[in-house]
Amino acid sequence: MLLLLLALAITVSTTAAPQISREQGNSLARKIDAINENATAKLATPKRTPITEPEVNSYLAFNIKEKIPRGLTQPQIRMVGNGQLAGRVLVDMDDFKRGRSSGGIMDPMNYISGQVPLTARGALSTRDGKGQFQLTSAEMNGYPLPKPLVQELVRYFSRTANNPTGYNIDEPFNLPAKIREITVNPAESIVVQ
Protein backbone atom coordinates (compact mmCIF):
# COMPACT_ATOMS: atom_id res chain seq x y z
CA MET A 1 0.00 0.00 0.00
CA LEU A 2 2.89 2.38 0.80
CA LEU A 3 4.47 1.93 -2.64
CA LEU A 4 1.12 2.51 -4.33
CA LEU A 5 0.60 5.76 -2.39
CA LEU A 6 4.13 6.96 -3.10
CA ALA A 7 4.01 6.09 -6.78
CA LEU A 8 0.73 7.94 -7.09
CA ALA A 9 2.11 10.91 -5.18
CA ILE A 10 5.10 11.06 -7.51
CA THR A 11 3.11 10.51 -10.66
CA VAL A 12 -0.02 12.46 -9.81
CA SER A 13 -1.20 18.08 -9.42
CA THR A 14 -2.73 19.76 -6.60
CA THR A 15 -3.53 23.42 -6.21
CA ALA A 16 -4.34 23.77 -2.51
CA ALA A 17 -2.83 22.10 0.52
CA PRO A 18 -5.36 19.72 2.08
CA GLN A 19 -6.34 19.91 5.76
CA ILE A 20 -4.19 17.37 7.55
CA SER A 21 -3.90 16.17 11.13
CA ARG A 22 -2.35 13.35 13.10
CA GLU A 23 -5.89 12.17 13.96
CA GLN A 24 -6.76 11.86 10.23
CA GLY A 25 -3.54 9.92 9.61
CA ASN A 26 -4.32 7.55 12.48
CA SER A 27 -7.82 7.07 11.08
CA LEU A 28 -6.36 5.84 7.79
CA ALA A 29 -3.85 3.64 9.64
CA ARG A 30 -6.77 1.93 11.40
CA LYS A 31 -8.59 1.48 8.08
CA ILE A 32 -5.49 -0.04 6.48
CA ASP A 33 -5.18 -2.44 9.42
CA ALA A 34 -8.86 -3.43 9.01
CA ILE A 35 -8.38 -3.96 5.25
CA ASN A 36 -5.34 -6.18 5.90
CA GLU A 37 -7.16 -8.11 8.65
CA ASN A 38 -10.11 -8.74 6.34
CA ALA A 39 -7.73 -9.96 3.60
CA THR A 40 -6.10 -12.50 5.93
CA ALA A 41 -9.31 -13.70 7.57
CA LYS A 42 -10.21 -17.33 7.00
CA LEU A 43 -13.53 -16.22 5.54
CA ALA A 44 -12.82 -12.79 4.07
CA THR A 45 -16.03 -10.85 3.61
CA PRO A 46 -16.87 -8.34 0.88
CA LYS A 47 -16.12 -4.93 2.31
CA ARG A 48 -16.24 -1.30 1.17
CA THR A 49 -13.91 1.14 2.94
CA PRO A 50 -14.15 4.89 2.27
CA ILE A 51 -10.85 6.75 2.42
CA THR A 52 -10.82 10.53 2.38
CA GLU A 53 -8.30 12.87 0.80
CA PRO A 54 -7.39 14.43 4.19
CA GLU A 55 -6.79 10.94 5.61
CA VAL A 56 -4.38 10.04 2.79
CA ASN A 57 -2.46 13.30 3.03
CA SER A 58 -2.34 13.12 6.83
CA TYR A 59 -1.08 9.52 6.65
CA LEU A 60 1.68 10.62 4.26
CA ALA A 61 2.61 13.59 6.48
CA PHE A 62 2.49 11.93 9.90
CA ASN A 63 2.30 8.14 9.82
CA ILE A 64 4.79 7.15 7.12
CA LYS A 65 6.92 10.27 6.79
CA GLU A 66 10.06 8.28 7.68
CA LYS A 67 9.28 5.63 5.04
CA ILE A 68 9.08 8.09 2.15
CA PRO A 69 12.18 7.66 -0.05
CA ARG A 70 15.08 9.99 0.60
CA GLY A 71 14.89 12.89 -1.85
CA LEU A 72 11.10 13.22 -1.74
CA THR A 73 9.21 15.47 0.68
CA GLN A 74 5.73 16.84 1.24
CA PRO A 75 3.77 14.44 -1.00
CA GLN A 76 0.12 15.36 -1.46
CA ILE A 77 -2.64 13.56 -3.35
CA ARG A 78 -5.91 15.05 -4.56
CA MET A 79 -8.84 12.83 -5.50
CA VAL A 80 -10.46 14.65 -8.40
CA GLY A 81 -13.17 12.08 -9.23
CA ASN A 82 -14.04 9.81 -12.17
CA GLY A 83 -10.84 7.89 -11.44
CA GLN A 84 -8.75 11.07 -11.76
CA LEU A 85 -5.94 11.76 -9.29
CA ALA A 86 -3.61 14.71 -8.97
CA GLY A 87 -0.54 15.09 -6.84
CA ARG A 88 2.46 17.10 -5.82
CA VAL A 89 5.79 16.23 -4.29
CA LEU A 90 9.04 18.12 -3.71
CA VAL A 91 11.92 16.36 -5.44
CA ASP A 92 15.56 16.79 -4.42
CA MET A 93 17.07 17.03 -7.89
CA ASP A 94 20.63 16.95 -6.53
CA ASP A 95 19.93 13.54 -4.94
CA PHE A 96 18.35 12.32 -8.18
CA LYS A 97 21.27 13.52 -10.33
CA ARG A 98 23.83 11.81 -8.06
CA GLY A 99 22.15 8.49 -8.80
CA ARG A 100 21.98 8.72 -12.59
CA SER A 101 24.31 9.10 -15.52
CA SER A 102 24.05 12.44 -17.25
CA GLY A 103 22.86 12.81 -20.81
CA GLY A 104 25.42 15.57 -21.39
CA ILE A 105 24.81 19.26 -21.91
CA MET A 106 21.55 18.56 -23.75
CA ASP A 107 20.06 16.80 -20.71
CA PRO A 108 17.46 19.21 -19.26
CA MET A 109 17.82 17.60 -15.82
CA ASN A 110 21.37 19.01 -15.59
CA TYR A 111 19.92 22.52 -15.30
CA ILE A 112 17.62 21.84 -12.35
CA SER A 113 18.87 21.67 -8.78
CA GLY A 114 17.61 21.81 -5.22
CA GLN A 115 14.09 21.03 -3.98
CA VAL A 116 11.73 21.32 -6.96
CA PRO A 117 7.93 20.77 -7.03
CA LEU A 118 6.73 18.01 -9.34
CA THR A 119 3.01 18.04 -10.09
CA ALA A 120 1.10 15.62 -12.25
CA ARG A 121 -2.35 14.31 -13.12
CA GLY A 122 -3.62 10.96 -14.23
CA ALA A 123 -6.33 8.34 -14.08
CA LEU A 124 -6.38 5.22 -11.92
CA SER A 125 -8.41 2.35 -13.29
CA THR A 126 -8.90 -0.82 -11.25
CA ARG A 127 -10.77 -4.05 -11.79
CA ASP A 128 -10.61 -7.65 -10.57
CA GLY A 129 -7.65 -7.01 -8.26
CA LYS A 130 -5.55 -5.25 -10.91
CA GLY A 131 -4.78 -1.56 -11.31
CA GLN A 132 -3.27 0.70 -13.93
CA PHE A 133 -2.32 4.36 -13.81
CA GLN A 134 -2.46 6.52 -16.94
CA LEU A 135 -0.36 9.69 -16.68
CA THR A 136 -2.07 12.61 -18.45
CA SER A 137 0.24 15.53 -17.61
CA ALA A 138 3.22 16.50 -15.48
CA GLU A 139 5.11 19.67 -14.64
CA MET A 140 8.32 20.41 -12.81
CA ASN A 141 8.68 23.88 -11.39
CA GLY A 142 5.83 24.97 -13.68
CA TYR A 143 7.33 23.59 -16.91
CA PRO A 144 5.83 20.62 -18.79
CA LEU A 145 7.73 17.41 -18.08
CA PRO A 146 7.83 14.71 -20.78
CA LYS A 147 6.59 11.27 -19.75
CA PRO A 148 10.04 9.59 -20.17
CA LEU A 149 11.51 11.99 -17.59
CA VAL A 150 8.58 11.37 -15.23
CA GLN A 151 9.18 7.63 -15.66
CA GLU A 152 12.87 8.05 -14.89
CA LEU A 153 12.05 9.94 -11.69
CA VAL A 154 9.44 7.37 -10.64
CA ARG A 155 11.80 4.46 -11.27
CA TYR A 156 14.62 6.11 -9.35
CA PHE A 157 12.60 7.03 -6.25
CA SER A 158 10.53 3.82 -6.11
CA ARG A 159 13.46 1.39 -6.14
CA THR A 160 13.58 -1.08 -3.25
CA ALA A 161 15.56 -4.18 -2.38
CA ASN A 162 12.64 -6.28 -3.67
CA ASN A 163 12.19 -4.11 -6.78
CA PRO A 164 15.63 -2.75 -7.73
CA THR A 165 14.43 -1.32 -11.06
CA GLY A 166 11.57 0.64 -9.46
CA TYR A 167 7.99 1.13 -10.53
CA ASN A 168 6.99 1.40 -14.21
CA ILE A 169 4.02 3.77 -14.46
CA ASP A 170 2.80 2.09 -17.66
CA GLU A 171 2.59 -1.43 -16.25
CA PRO A 172 -0.54 -2.83 -14.62
CA PHE A 173 -0.08 -3.85 -10.98
CA ASN A 174 -1.74 -6.17 -8.50
CA LEU A 175 -3.78 -4.48 -5.81
CA PRO A 176 -2.74 -5.56 -2.28
CA ALA A 177 -4.84 -7.15 0.48
CA LYS A 178 -7.40 -8.80 -1.80
CA ILE A 179 -8.62 -5.39 -2.94
CA ARG A 180 -10.86 -5.89 -5.98
CA GLU A 181 -11.16 -2.26 -7.04
CA ILE A 182 -10.72 1.34 -5.96
CA THR A 183 -13.25 3.96 -7.02
CA VAL A 184 -11.89 7.51 -7.03
CA ASN A 185 -14.57 10.11 -6.32
CA PRO A 186 -14.08 13.81 -5.52
CA ALA A 187 -12.14 14.02 -2.21
CA GLU A 188 -12.86 10.34 -1.38
CA SER A 189 -12.00 6.90 -2.69
CA ILE A 190 -13.79 3.64 -1.97
CA VAL A 191 -11.68 0.52 -1.49
CA VAL A 192 -13.63 -2.63 -2.37
CA GLN A 193 -12.49 -6.06 -1.16
Image (spheres, rainbow, N blue to C red):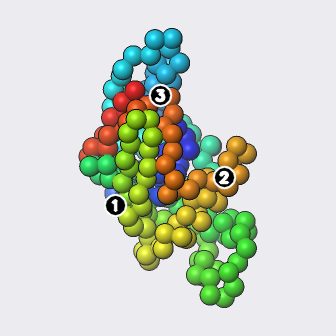
Q: CA distance from mark 2 to mark 1?
A: 28 Å
Residue underneath mark 2: 159
> For the residue marked with disc 1, what is the amino acid?
Thr
Secondary structure under tag 2 reads loop
Query: In this view of the protein, can residue 59 be seen by the observer?
Result: no
Identity of the residue drawn at 58% across and 64% down: 153
Residue closest to the far top: 42
Q: Residues within 10 Å of mark 1 (few under 14, many from 20)?
A: few
The quadrant the C terminus occupies is top left
Which mark is on residue 55?
none
**Quick check: marks 1 and 3 in contact, CB under 8 Å?**
no
* Residue bearing the label numbered 1: 15
Q: Amino acid at mark 2?
A: Arg
Q: Position of residue 124 (x, y in %)?
A: 38, 49
What's under tag 3, amino acid-wise? Answer: Lys
Instruction: Please tell me in which quadrant of the rendered image residue 51 appears.
Output: top left
Bin the neighbour count of mark 2 within 10 Å (Cα to Cα): few under 14, some 14-19, many 20 and up: some
Which residue is at 51% across, 56% downward? 169
Write down the residue under mark 3: 178
Name which residue lies at 61% across and 58% down. Answer: 155
| In the depicted structure, whether residue 70 falls above or below residue 105 | above
Judged by depth in the image, the label closer to the viewer, 1 or 3, is 3
Q: Residues within 10 Å of mark 3 (few under 14, many from 20)?
A: some
Residue at the (58%, 81%) spot, across then down: 108
Q: Circles 2 and 3: CB distance less than 8 Å?
A: no
At mark 3, the secondary structure is loop
Q: Position of residue 59 (x, y in %)?
A: 48, 39
